[in-house]
Image (spheres, helix red, strand yellow):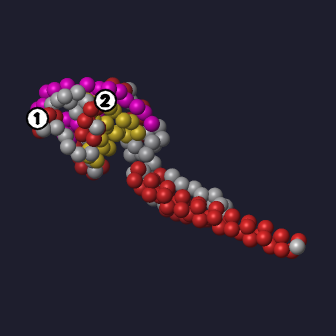
Amino acid sequence: VPTNAGIMQAPGVQETGGLQGFGHLIPRKAAYKAGVRTLGTIWSSSLFPTRAPKDYEMLLCYIGGSRDVGIGDMKEEDILKQCDLDIRKVLLKPGWQGEAKPLGVRLWPRAIPQYEKGHLDVLEQIEAKTPEGLFLGGNYKTGVAFGDCVDYGIQEAKKVSAYVKGKLETAKQAAAAKEAVAA
């Protein structure tokens, strides 16, 4: 799933007092109508104020994905131009004439997974074929949000712990029975 992150600093947002919040996601239908290809933007300098100089905002733009794979074939400067156009449409006041300072582009050909129709059926098939004692986990099961992955990891760790404790108890009982027979 081609996904690109264009990293930019955008001066001029300070006219509104700076960005406050985590960022934004752009619904695909609305984005399509507006000609916006960016999936969403993290307002990095709002989360981490020292990441951008005074009067600047650092924005991490996510673009591409399974529904816009052509982004992966674009040149870096074209990706940055697209992110800049999108930011101007979504965040900046109409007519703003400032210039963004691009910091770079990173391409992740297989980034955030896209859960297609039938994904839950595939998970059920995998679970049915998973041998006892093998525990599978990851964002393909619970979602890509960090909190979801942490919560899932905690719950899965409890299952693994209970399984190992059960196996140890069974092994202890078997050893005790063997000793009793030998005695």
| Residue 42 visible here | yes
Along the horizontal axis of the image, is 96 left or right of 60?
left
Tell which tag, 2 or 1, sits nearer the viewer. 1
Q: Quadrant of the C terminus?
A: bottom right
Is 143 rendered above or below residue 10? Answer: below
- Checking the image for residue 75, the label placed there is none
Q: Is disc 2 surrounded by few (<14), some (14 to 19) or many (20+) residues within 10 Å?
A: many
The residue under the point 32% across, 44% down is 39
Along the horizontal axis of the image, is 126 left or right of 168?
left
The residue lying toward the viewer, choosing from 176 and 25, is 176
Picture quadrant where residue 112 is located? top left
**Residue holding disc 2:** 80
Is 79 rendered above or below residue 175? Answer: above
Question: What's the amino acid at mark 2?
Answer: Leu
Residue 100 position in % (x across, y down): 23, 27
Indicate the secondary structure of the residue bearing disc 1: helix
The residue under the point 37% across, 40% down is 64
Q: Of label 2 and label 1, which has the lower sequence position? A: 1
Along the horizontal axis of the image, is 90 left or right of 126?
left
Which residues, given as a range, are shown in magenta? 79-108
Residue 79 position in % (x across, y down): 33, 31
Q: Is disc 1 surrounded by few (<14), some (14 to 19) or many (20+) residues within 10 Å?
A: few
Residue 59 position in % (x across, y down): 27, 35
**Residue holding disc 1:** 15
The residue under the point 39% across, 46% down is 67
Q: Quadrant of the N terminus?
A: top left
Indicate the secondary structure of the residue bearing disc 2: helix
Compute the Cα span from label 2 to label 1: 23 Å
Residue 74 position in % (x across, y down): 38, 30
| Residue 83 included in the magenta stretch of the image | yes
Picture quadrant where residue 52 is located? top left
